[in-house]
Image: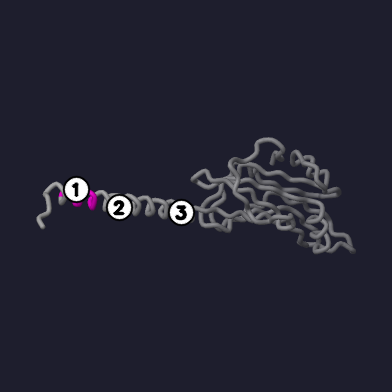
Amino acid sequence: MRLDSNYLQAIGTMAAAIAALIALFVAWDQGRVMRQEIRASVWPALQVDGFSSQRDGDIVQGLNIQNAGVGPARIDSIAIRYQGALVPDLEALSELFPGHTGRSATSSTGRIIGAGDTVEVFAFQSPRAEDDDAVEMMYDLASNYTVDVCYCSVLDECWMAHTSGSANPKPESVDACPVEGVSQL
């Protein structure tokens, strides 16, 4: 039986087409894996924690944001709520810490936090009364305040991080950071 040259040519063409499809799939899969590796290599992971501590006879209470990820994070918005109501700015927040004798704040919105860095967003210092307990005060803070921080990576992928006392402290992916209903800090 003699094979026709057109038949052999058709088999060769089909084999080349199959090889090209396999190569195309391998290239697509490698591109997908590379995109995932790039995302993972620049992934920021912000941890939002309130604090209450005793320092030199005073009680200091405030908010820290730490980047526990591997890439820089750009903070796009922060929403602080006291008993469910939005705290609009630092002045309104300051009123919620009566009797404070000192305060400090760092502009946070638009700030870039490098991997491993921590920013103290604000702190209020008050004279410690004899019956003040920093741990009990921390529990009081956690039960009354919630903080949501929206941040993005250098690839403009964004997440919403919450204080550890919230119902869902794990950062969640969001399409974009909110511009309304946020605190001006």
- Residue 96 at x, y percent in the picture: 83, 46
- Disc 1: CA contacts within 10 A as few (<14), some (14-19) or many (>=20): few
- State the residue in front, 173 or 24: 24
Q: Nearer the viewer, mark 1 or mark 3?
A: 1
The residue under label 1 is 10
- Residue 62 at x, y percent in the picture: 74, 53
Image quadrant occupied by the N terminus: bottom left
Verify whether residue 14 appears in magenta: yes
Q: Which residue is drawn at the image coordinates 69% and 35% (left, top)?
A: 180
- Residue 15 at x, y percent in the picture: 23, 53
Relative placement, left or right, of 62 versus 6 is right
- Disc 2: CA contacts within 10 A as few (<14), some (14-19) or many (>=20): few
User: Which three-letter amino acid code belongs to the residue tagged 3?
Assistant: Gln
Q: Earlier in the sequence, mark 1 or mark 3?
A: 1
Residue 157 in view, yes or no: yes
Looking at the rendering, which quadrant does residue 185 occupy?
A: top right
The residue under label 3 is 36
> SS at mark 2?
helix
User: Which three-letter amino acid code belongs to the residue tagged 2?
Assistant: Ala
